[in-house]
Image: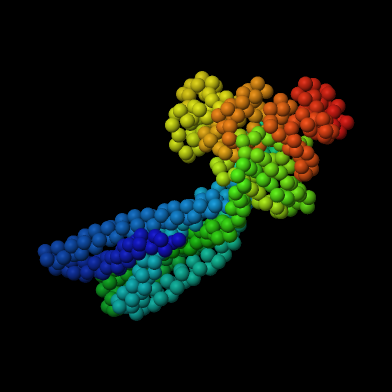
């Protein structure tokens, strides 16, 4: 992926190389000005205009070229770095989108968010300094040759000091690598914990668990802090060495240079250029250290990104769904599903055929496998056995817990598919949501807040239903979708569906007797197995467990006391 942006880095490296040459050339200019302009002025009390203009031209010209090189290096290095970050982010997001829901259910959302955000920035943070670091290597080689050209003794100092500085950087990178790797992993865990805590903020507040959450997140943050502190402790000692070594070198150069000037082996200008050159090299040498100090953190982040990007795509469950015969909306042939890590299947040996255009209620006690069966039909999870056939048409699902984006009503209904106002209002009317939406402050443009926090539970459910209905699906799956609305509104919704979407096959999970009675057919599910399939009246007459369950539903809605007694007797 880095190769996609090599043009930016190539230009940045050229700019850095020009900067390196100009840095060495500037020490030559200092030498020339001192020996040819300043020193003769003290000796003869006379200033040669030609020498002065030549010296000024050298210093100003080199300075301008050096400044332009800095701008080119920084601009293109930064652009290259952020283009690589864009490439990494796109790659992570593309892979996250391509993985099926079964893959996502096994991974914390916060950790995945960290890999697409924090890890991406950390992975590319080392790239921008690389052109300057490469130019520093060029400066070191050029400076060593220049110093040997001036004087062998001064050159020998560079021959000792530069490898020492590079060796210090390499040792540091080796020592700090493990600390940064752990810190990056802990940061992903902390991000996942924070995301989970924010998602469950209502639960935390309702149960007064703020102290528990604070302690839990504090523990995760402490792990990040400890890893970072350990890494920074190593880094601080390393940076102190980077400060001490050049300072001691300058002292050695001053003493040695003074001796060489006194013996006449070097001129004052040459000696000054050596000190000037070492002074200019102090910051670039530190930048090599910075680049190497960022390398472990960037590598740790890059490995976390690669773990997502290179992980093989799991098969899309929808790819195994085949087209049902004409007139059949849904056909399940011996379908079973076992959740990963579980021994008992949630759904076992289901054989079921639903005619196109019918409304079927899926009824069963808690844990019977109703939601799992709906997930199988819509293609969110793959069956571990059996096959699924569906009519070749648009399929939509409305989940038991409606999810709304933090945008407007219109954005939640459209969900990325631009619709005309009339289409949006039609879907809202079918979902019995048009009336309350029309009374909102800005109508369709009213912002509903994160997860629809400004709306009631029933309003959120109806908006989620309108989102599905706006697609005019041929297969509509409702997972207890209208549980938060009153029976009268629910009846009107089902009546609207029958009128406006007469050819739509509807499979709905229901726990309200009035809803069940409105369905054309009922599928009774118990312990993951289809116990009965027929009309509501027929099942009430012939299937005792079904009749007891429906009566328990009715009792639960009439009297909490009776519901408790029924549950105690094992009716529901």
Front one among 26 and 561: 561
Residue 387 placement (x, y as % from top left): 67, 51
Residue drawn at (59%, 46%) of the image: 110
Residue 234 placement (x, y as % from top left): 56, 60
Residue located farthest toward the front when viewing the structure as drawn: 326
Q: Is residue 424 visible?
A: yes
Q: Is residue 46 visible?
A: no
Colouring style = rainbow
- In this rendering, the count of numbered labels is 0
Front one among 293 and 237: 293
Q: Quadrant of residue 131?
A: bottom left
Residue drawn at (35%, 62%) of the image: 7
Q: Quadrant of residue 421?
A: top left
Q: Quick check: 217 above or below 246? A: above
Q: Quick check: 252 above or below 126? A: below
Residue 313 placement (x, y as % from top left): 58, 57
Q: Viewed as shown, does residue 352 lie left or right of 109? A: right
Front one among 540 and 238: 540
Residue drawn at (75%, 38%) of the image: 533
Q: Viewed as shown, does residue 235 lie left or right of 254? A: right
Q: Quick check: 33 above or below 216? A: below
Q: Viewed as shown, does residue 220 lie left or right of 569? A: left
Residue located farthest toward the right when viewing the structure as drawn: 569
Residue 67 placement (x, y as % from top left): 28, 57
Residue drawn at (59%, 29%) of the image: 497
Q: Quadrant of the N terminus?
A: bottom left
């Amino acid at each position: 992926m880095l190769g996609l942006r090599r043009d930016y880095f190539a230009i940045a490296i050229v700019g850095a190389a020009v900067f390196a040459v100009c840095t060495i050339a500037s020490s030559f200019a200092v030498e020339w000005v001192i020996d040819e302009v300043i020193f003769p002025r003290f000796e003869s009390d006379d200033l040669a205009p030609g020498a002065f203009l030549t010296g000024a031209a050298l210093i100003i010209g080199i300075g301008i070229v050096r400044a332009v090189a800095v701008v080119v290096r920084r601009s293109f290095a930064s652009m290259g770095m952020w283009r690589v970050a864009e490439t990494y982010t796109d790659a992570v997001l593309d892979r996250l989108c391509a993985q099926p829901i079964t893959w996502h259910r096994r991974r914390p959302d916060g950790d995945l968010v960290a890999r697409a955000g924090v890890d991406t920035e950390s992975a590319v943070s080392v790239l921008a300094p690389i052109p300057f670091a490469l130019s520093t290597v060029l400066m070191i080689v050029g400076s060593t040759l220049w110093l040997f050209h001036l004087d062998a003794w001064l050159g020998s100092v560079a021959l000792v000091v530069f490898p020492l500085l590079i060796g210090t950087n390499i040792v540091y990178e080796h020592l700090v690598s493990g600390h940064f790797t752990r810190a990056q992993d802990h940061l992903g865990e902390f991000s996942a914990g924070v995301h989970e805590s924010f998602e469950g903020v209502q639960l935390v507040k309702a149960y007064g668990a703020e102290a528990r959450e604070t302690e839990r997140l504090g523990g995760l943050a402490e792990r990040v802090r400890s890893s970072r502190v350990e890494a920074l402790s190593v880094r601080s000692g390393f940076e102190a060495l980077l400060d001490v070594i050049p300072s001691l070198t300058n002292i050695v150069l001053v003493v040695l240079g003074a001796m060489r000037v006194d013996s006449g082996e070097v001129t004052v200008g040459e000696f000054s250029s050596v000190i000037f050159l070492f002074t200019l090299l102090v910051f670039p040498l530190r930048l090599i250290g910075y680049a190497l100090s960022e390398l472990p953190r960037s590598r740790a982040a890059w490995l976390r990104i690669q773990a997502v990007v290179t992980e093989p795509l799991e098969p899309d469950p929808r790819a195994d769904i085949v087209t049902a015969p004409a007139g059949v909306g849904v056909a399940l042939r011996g379908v079973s599903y076992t959740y990963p890590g579980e021994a008992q299947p949630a759904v076992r040996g289901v054989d079921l055929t639903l005619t196109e255009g019918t409304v079927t209620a899926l009824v069963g006690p808690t844990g019977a496998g109703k939601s799992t069966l709906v997930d199988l039909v819509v293609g969110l999870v793959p069956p571990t056995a059996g096959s699924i056939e569906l009519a070749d048409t648009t399929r939509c699902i409305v989940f038991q817990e409606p999810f709304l984006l933090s945008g407007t009503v219109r954005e939640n209904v459209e969900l990325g598919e631009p619709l005309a106002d009339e289409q949006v209002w039609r879907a809202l009317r079918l979902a019995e949501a048009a009336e309350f939406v029309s009374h909102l402050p800005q109508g369709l443009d009213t912002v509903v807040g994160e997860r629809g926090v400004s709306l009631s539970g029933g309003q959120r459910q109806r908006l989620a239903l309108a989102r599905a209905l706006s697609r005019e699906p041929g297969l509509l799956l409702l997972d207890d979708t209208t549980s938060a609305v009153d029976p009268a509104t629910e009846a009107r919704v089902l009546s609207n569906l029958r009128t406006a979407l007469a050819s739509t096959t509807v499979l709905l999970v229901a726990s309200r007797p009035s809803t069940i009675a409105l369905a054309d057919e009922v599928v009774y599910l118990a312990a993951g197995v289809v116990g009965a399939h027929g009309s509501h009246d027929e099942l009430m007459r012939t299937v005792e467990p079904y009749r007891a369950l429906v009566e328990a539903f009715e009792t639960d809605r009439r009297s909490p006391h009776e519901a408790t007694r029924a549950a105690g007797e094992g009716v529901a």
